[in-house]
Amino acid sequence: MSGLVAIMSMSLDGFVAGPNDDVSGVFDWYFTSGDVEVRTGGADPMTFRVSAPSAAHIREVTGGLGAVLTGRRTFEVAQGWGGNHAWGPAFVLTHEVPPGWPRPDSTVHFVTDGLESAVARAKAAAGGKSVGVHGADTIRQLLEAGLLDELSIDLAAVLVGSGTRLFDDPGLARTRLGDPTVAAGVGVTHLRYPVRND
């Protein structure tokens, strides 16, 4: 059975994006922290240049993914990943389908009938693999609903100061996490926490 894994890069002071959705501060380590290349694939591929421990972490986490679940804001900021996300079919939780979508040959799907439906569709598409989750609001909703299985946080060695916080919700105070696995990269620490939904 596939699980739901939140995958986010976050500053030491808790921000996943700075003002105006600027993610450069929390994502810089993907491009400047080493000389090991990791290619993302998808319709809009990128090549990361990271340290060996970060490359191993990225490959381990993303290698187990079969689909992605995200919110509308992340979809917009990512410009729809060129129509095909590198992790497999993408399911965008939204109130309405954006103009110009869906597109031919795209694996981006829009779910307008709620969180549970989006989770069910993404898990079915993942084919027994895990579902990667993007977007602060989507992650918070899944945590509050007790549906998230793991938090994979790439803690960037930067202080952003303001913007979008990942855990900016008092309703998450009751969330319990298991012991983390930790990998130290260059300019980033990779933390993987199982979520205890008991």
Image: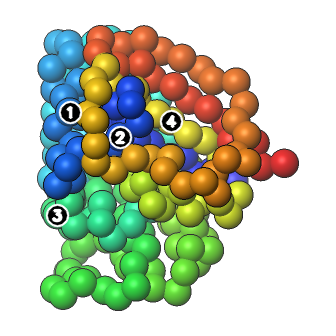
Which label belongs to residue 15? 2
Q: Mark 4 or mark 3, which has the lower sequence index?
A: 3
Q: Secondary structure at mark 3?
A: helix
Alpha carbon distance from label 4 to label 3: 23 Å
Q: Which dot, 1 or 3, sits closer to the camera?
A: 1
Horizontal side, residue 71 vs residue 132: left or right: left
Under mark 4, the amino acid is Ser
Residue nearest the viewer, comparing 59 with 71: 71
Alpha carbon distance from label 1 to label 3: 19 Å
Q: Secondary structure at mark 4?
A: strand
Q: With respect to residue 149, does 115 lie above or below? A: below
Answer whether labels 3 and 2 touch (C-beta < 8 Å): no
Whole-percent x, y for residue 7 in the image: 44, 42
Q: Mark 1 or mark 2, which has the lower sequence index?
A: 2
User: Which residue lies under the disc numbered 3?
Assistant: 79
Q: Which dot, 3 or 2, sits closer to the camera?
A: 2
Residue 121 lies in quadrant: bottom right
Alpha carbon distance from label 1 to label 4: 18 Å
